[in-house]
Image (spheres, helix red, strand yellow):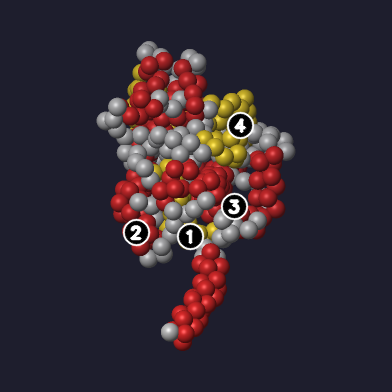
Amino acid sequence: MKRLMVLVGFMLMVATVLGSALAPAAAQEPIKIGVIYGLGGAAAPYTKPAVTGHEMAVEEINGKGGVLGRKLQLVIRDDQSKPDVGVREARDLILKEKVNFLTGIIHSGVALAVSEVAKEYKTILLVSIAKTAALTEDKGHRYAFRSTSNTLIEGRAAAILMAQQPFKRYAIAGPDYEYGHRMGEDFVTQLKKLRPDVQIVTEVWPKLGERDFTPHINALLQAKPDMVFSAIWGGDHIAFVKQAKPYGFFSKTQYLAIGQGDLDVVVPLGAEAPEGMWVSSNYTFYHPDSPANRDFVAKYKARTGDLPPSGAAFAYTSTYFLAEAIRKAKSTETEKVVDALEGLTVETVHGPLTIRAYDHQSNKGQYFGRLKKAPEYPFLIIGDLQYIGGEKTMRTLDEVKALRGQK
């Protein structure tokens, strides 16, 4: 009996020692974040800086000890701006890489497809760029979140702005997929409520990644609109502007380019950016003049030699939302982090942002104005800058519940 007690005691001691040795090792396992973007084509002006934004945030967080004593680790994948590829990469990240969370995505079709994967595997997807309102409205669910604005927020804001202008004849231009059509619909619906006298004289829907915009440019000019509302973005917007200028396009009609006041496209356009063109912007390095934004600008410039474009700000913000939610939850367990993200407010480079508890949509708004020259910069900036916050244009929770068939 005495020998048995000694043996049991020895085994307990060994188990305690092994447990003590293994516990710190387990605690040091990284928190893995799967990052998915289309890294080429029209998306590249945004997504290449976005990768830098994620990396900056992770390095800063890890440099301060990580989250819950664990380092963050990024696993980056290219969805090629194709929903089927996005689904394949998301499954691989969840099943093989064993990521704790998913973030990123710029293509709205990819976002909707990957959202279904997140729902299937009960894995949090925090979308950083993709804008279709459907993600957090009728197709929203417990595991889908967004840290930026959406097509409804931006479309309604643009309509509020345009309703104050004298334009009556509108043309709609946008890429022929979920984002383009949804942005056009959300804008037109609100504009007609505010200005029943407006007319939509034509619509053009070039494919994403279009090389030759000539037929679309001619169709727009032939319709003789007072204003073209455009959701053409990124590399496609750069190509459109360059191809439209020889036709005198921007002197023959007004043009509102959603999101295209961003440095991601204004800098590559340089002197070819049309002065006076109406734009909105997702992020500006000169507003808000807050400690968080000044710090971000300084760090990005020190790292890259450039001012930060919107892609970097999108990614930086989503990474910090995830980190703060994990801290709040005191866990990486999915259900606890979901609860922590719901209603979470984070001080960001855009100012304080909140992800609503019910629909998981951020209240981030959009900047509007007209491009102008600034002697201190080799690119155009936004003049007459005004910010329309998401809280002014989001659907009410009752409206979102109705879209989901809930009471």
Q: Which residue is mark 1?
A: 32
Instruction: Return the disc, 2 or 4, that comes first in the chain's sequence.
Output: 2
Instruction: Return the disc, 2 or 1, that comes first in the chain's sequence.
Output: 1
Q: Do the residues bearing badges 3 and 1 touch, measured as CB atoms within 8 Å?
A: no
Q: Position of residue 242 (x, y in %)?
A: 50, 41
Element on which disc 2 rests: helix
Task: Name which residue lies at 41% across and 30% down.
Answer: 152
Q: CA distance from mark 3 to mark 4?
A: 27 Å
Q: Amino acid at mark 4?
A: Ile
Q: Position of residue 78 (x, y in %)?
A: 42, 58
Q: CA distance from mark 2 to mark 1?
A: 14 Å
Element on which disc 4 rests: strand
**In the image: residue 191, left or right of residue 24:** left
**In the image: residue 6, left or right of residue 59:** left
**In the image: residue 140, left or right of residue 48:** left
Q: Amino acid at mark 2?
A: Arg
Q: Do the residues bearing badges 2 and 1 touch, measured as CB atoms within 8 Å?
A: no
Tell me, for residue 57, which label it has, or none. 3
Task: Name which residue lies at 29% across and 32% down.
Answer: 404
Element on which disc 1 rests: strand
Q: Which residue is mark 2?
A: 91
Q: Which residue is mark 4?
A: 382
